[in-house]
Structures are given as structure tokens and as C-alpha cells.
Image (tube, grey):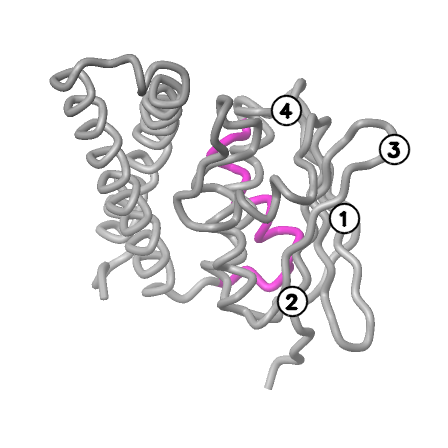
Amino acid sequence: MIAPDDARADLYLNYLRAIGHDVGAPLRHIRGFADLLDDELGRELAEEPRKLLSKVQQSAEIAEQMLYGVHELAHLAQGARPSMISSLADLFRAGCRSCERSLTSLEITGDAELVSDQSLLRNAAEQLASNAVLYAVRPELKIDIDINDEQVICCFTDPGPGLTKAEMERAIKPFQRLRRRPSPAHVGLGLTVVHQVAIGLEGALASRQENDGRFSVILKIPRRYPG
């Protein structure tokens, strides 16, 4: 485990997060552009340019796998330290902190006692806040937390545009890209990571296109009482 003390843990964790944010976006653009060239010009390229394009695509895929490993290291670094946060709303707010300067609006309604792994839930909020900043028409995020007898239901809504059901199914598969056109909004490592969080917490992930054009990602996790 990383971080025998809080100062070192913060240093490592912030560094790993910086890598994920700074490298992730340009890497997605490189991979998307290479795939677009392949779709549009692949058959017309001579042998040498074709080999170079293939090398770029393979290298981008390896780099994406590396970046996913960096995210996993961040989980371990954060999970190595006990946290005093007991409110799910506070945890989500902390997860959005890395994007707070870019978000023009963050609204959280409802709350629940923490029910599962804090580092995973915090990372899910961070990924969805980042998606709202990078892809939504306005950098806004609304989080609704609801509970019933069996589940905690967390709905993350941004202004859109969103994904169709088919696009969402492809987006949550690790390192998948839609072919024949540039990747649509929200497609990248973010939704893949959130989907893995849902699986890790024995929950489920769904999406919904709202009537007013907004896009919602719904994270459902089992309700577990402390002790």
C-alpha cells in the first residue's frame, strides 16, 4: 500500500490524478484521430504510412491500458488512508473538487450514510464531473441521492448531449471506440471507470436521456448499514 503518512499519500495521490487528467484527454484525441484516418483513408494509404498508422493505434491502446492502471493505483493510494467522511453527499462533493474551478454549477440533493468503499465512490464522482466539464454543452452537474430499502440510487445529470443506449453499451467496454465517425461525447475512460466502480460495489450503472436534452448516469449500489 502507498502512503505510510498523510503528507506522502496526498503527494502520490495528487500526482496520479494529474497524470490521469492531463494525459487522458490528448490520448483520446490521438486514438480517435488515428481511427478516423483508418476509417476514411486506410485503404488508400501506401504500405509505409499504413504501418505507421497501425503503430500509432497499437501504441495508443497500450497507453490507455497504462492510464487505466494509473487510475487503479490512485484507488489504492486513496484507500490506504482512513477517511472521516460519513456523508455520501460530502464524499461526492470532495470527488468533484478537482473540477470545481471548471464547473459553473454543482448541485447535490439528498444524502445517505456511506454504504461502500469511499475511494471507489469518490472516483466515480470525479470521473462524471470531468465528463460534464469536457463534454457537456455547459459545465454543470446535478447529483440526486435517493435511498430505498435495498439500494442507494445516485443520479448524475449534466446538460447533455448524451449517448444512445447502444452508444452507452459500447462506451462502458474498456478501450472501445465507435467506428466510422469520431467518438461522441462522454466516450472514454471515464464511463469505463464508473462502470467498473459499479461492478466492484455489486451495483449497476444505467443512463437516461432526459426529455429536456439533459443526460443522466445512474449509479445504483446496495444499501449496507454500518456494522
Disc 3 crowd, CA 10 A, few/some/many (<14, 14-19, 20+): few
Does 185 lie within the magenta span?
no
Q: Given the image, on which type of amino acid does mark 2 rest?
A: Ile
Q: Earlier in the sequence, mark 4 or mark 1?
A: 4
Q: Given the image, on which type of amino acid does mark 1 rest?
A: Asp
- Image spot of residue 191 (x, y percent): 52, 45
Q: Is residue 210 above or below residue 152?
A: above
**147 lies left or right of 80:** right
- Image spot of residue 150 (x, y percent): 76, 76
The CA span between labels 4 and 2 is 25 Å
Q: Residue under label 3, please give it.
A: 211
Q: Earlier in the sequence, mark 3 or mark 1?
A: 1
Residue at the spot 21% in from the left edge and 27% down from the top edge: 56
The CA span between labels 3 and 1 is 17 Å
Q: Earlier in the sequence, mark 3 or mark 4?
A: 4
Q: Earlier in the sequence, mark 4 or mark 2?
A: 4
- Report the mark closest to the observer, 2 or 1: 2
**Residue at disc 1, secondary structure:** strand
**Residue at disc 4, secondary structure:** loop
- Report the mark closest to the observer, 3 or 4: 3
Q: Quadrant of residue 44?
A: top left
Quarter of the image with the N terminus is: bottom left
Give the residue at the far right of this rendering: 211
**Residue at disc 3, secondary structure:** loop
The CA span between labels 3 and 4 is 16 Å
Q: Residue under label 4, please give it.
A: 136
Task: Choose between 19 and 59: the one closer to the eye.
Answer: 59
In magenta, the rendered stretch is 84-100
Q: Earlier in the sequence, mark 3 or mark 2?
A: 3
Q: Residue under label 1, please give it.
A: 144
Q: Residue under label 2, please give it.
A: 221
